[in-house]
Amino acid sequence: MTITIDGKRCTCEKGEKLLAVARRNWIPIPTLCHHESLPGQASCRVCLVEVVQQGRSSVVASCVYPVEDGIEVYTNSDRVRAERGMVLALLRKRAPDSQLIADMCRLYDAPDLDRVKVSVPGKCILCGLCVRACTELSVGAISTVNRGVTKEIATPYHEPSAVCVGCGSCASVCPTGAIEIVETADTRTIWDKTFRLVRCARCGEPIGTEEELAHAARKGGTEPDTLCERCRRRSMTDVLAATYGDRE
Ligand code: SF4
């Protein structure tokens, strides 16, 4: 099927999400809660676009909207910019310390919303991407707790989690850098729990926490890694060279 995005004709498959089609065609749509290895969740709603179908126009979240043949899509129309600006204005109230949100608000002329109270200081927009990333690891160390203005992401009872492996995936997917991760030469501290870092047996670069490597090994049914990605590739090349190198 064919759709039009900002005047560009794009071919796509039934069931594909609009955001995926736009990205494949190098048409930028801003997102915060989206990660390419996880399904869309329309949590932040920054990816709003305008869809015109049979003369009727609506604004939809592109990360979860399945394409339909012949639709016309506008990613930056006046209506989209106004609605995206309002979404960002509300996110700024939720995460007043986020520089990224402040910058995006400027870009979209987001209204001040003086009457809406700031919930709590911080950078978290509660998009839940960190929780989903952790759950994907099948560890599930963090979750959304409380309701309303006290809603937050936390470990159970705000205690260091028994199941967290310190992989840092939650921090790396967080769009606003809200999750603090502190590394020294030998340790990584995240969610109030400190882990010992394991170094590559060959080059000495840190390759992960002991718990993270043990968890990955358990999942893969192997022994924990002792080499970093680069050295593992190099050692494989060495083996191949030793096996086939002298055949000429
Ligand atoms: S660091 Fe802990 S909480 Fe974060 S993704 Fe890894 S296991 Fe989950």
Image (cartoon, rainbow, N blue to C red):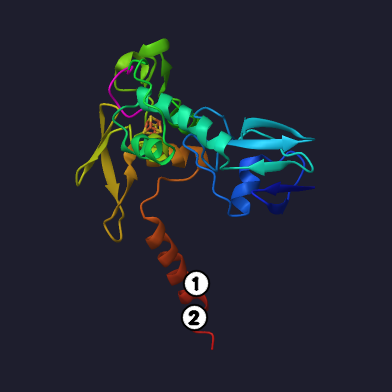
Q: Which amino acid does the dot numbered 1 rest on?
A: Leu
Q: Nearer the viewer, residue 153 or 223?
A: 153
User: Is 131 on the left-hand or right-hand side of 228?
Assistant: right
Tag 1, which secondary structure?
helix
Query: How many C-alpha atoms fall within 10 Å of the one at disc 1: few (<14), some, or many (≥20)?
Result: few
Q: Is residue 128 visible?
A: no
Region of the chain picked out in magenta, as a range: 118-124
Which residue: 36% across, 15% down? 115
Which residue: 34% across, 23% down? 161
Judge whether 118 appears above or below 19 on screen.
above
| Total number of numbered discs in the rendering | 2
- Ligand 1's quadrant: top left
Locate residue 68, reporting x and y percent: 76, 39
Disc 1 marks which residue?
240
Which residue: 41% across, 65% down? 235
Q: Mark 1 and mark 2: span between their CA atoms?
A: 7 Å
What kind of secondary structure does the magenta stretch mostly adopt? loop
Q: Is residue 34 magenta?
A: no
Which residue: 45% across, 25% down? 140
Disc 1 to disc 2: CB gap under 8 Å: yes
- Residue farthest toward the top in the current orientation of the protein: 147
Q: Which amino acid does the dot numbered 2 rest on?
A: Gly
Disc 2 marks which residue?
245
Q: Earlier in the sequence, mark 1 or mark 2?
A: 1
Q: Confirm or reject: label 2 Cβ below 8 Å from ligand 1.
A: no
Judge whether 95 appears above or below 235 on screen.
above
User: Is 186 on the left-hand or right-hand side of 38?
Assistant: left
Q: Is residue 121 magenta?
A: yes
Q: Is residue 205 visible?
A: yes
